[in-house]
Image (cartoon, rainbow, N blue to C red):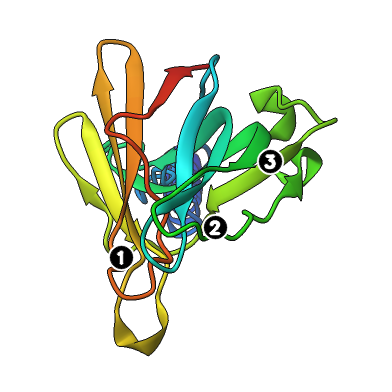
Amino acid sequence: MKRHLNWMLLVAFLLLALGSACGGAGTTSSTPTPTPTPTATYELWKGALPSTYYSLNIYGDRALKVTGKPWLVIKRDPVTLLVLDCEFGFSEITQVQIPNANNMPGSPEPTLAATTIDYCTKLQLDTTKPVTLCVGWGSKPSLINGVQTFSFKAGASPGGVGYNENWSFSLLSLTLWGDVTNLDKTYFLGRDSDSKAFSLSKM
């Protein structure tokens, strides 16, 4: 009987040792599951009413009036909510040369088919009419985030002049207002508008 008991204790010890060596049934890893990095979030904004900006002639006069419905896609950091990038343009545009002091026309703005815009469907752009892409996706090293505002410089004039234009947007109530200011005082290649010329609502 004693021999039998010793034999059972030996078997139990061996099974326990084997289970420990193999990690045991039902054991779990102590390595924590990594938290996935959140991806950027995108906001869609669109103006219900036409807005206007201007193309300048070589004298700096407002020479071409461009009118259309503004649209904007904002890329945000999901944690800090800072604006990382954006795409901005106008749909259903018209372009009209306007009288100016030097009687010099402005260069027509290039247009695209609305279907070439990334968020054409979600923005509900009219695909039968052209759009202008004023600001495309890409690096905006000059982008500045403020309280309910963001702004950035864009374009590059020849001859080392620097940026062509400054874009600024500010949220007042539920409306996002925007405008653009020409910065190129040599070649006048930047766009220009009145203050808070663009009015957009979140979709």
User: Which is in the foreground here, disc 1 or disc 2?
Assistant: 2
- Mark drawn on residue 141: 1
Image position, residue 40 (x, y; %): 45, 42
Image position, residue 52 (x, y; %): 48, 33
* Tag 2: amino acid: Gly
Residue 10 visible here: no
Residue at (26% x, 41% y) in the render: 150
The secondary structure type at the circle numbered 3 is strand
Which residue is the site of mark 3?
A: 131
Q: Are marks 1 and 3 in contact (CB under 8 Å)?
A: no
Between the C-alphas of marks 1 and 3, the distance is 26 Å
In the image, 18: left or right of 124? left
The secondary structure type at the circle numbered 1 is loop
* Tag 1: amino acid: Pro
Q: Place residue 128 in its image quadrant.
A: top right
Which residue is the site of mark 2?
A: 106
User: Sequence-wise, which precedes: disc 3 or disc 2?
Assistant: 2
Query: How many numbered tags mark residues here?
Result: 3
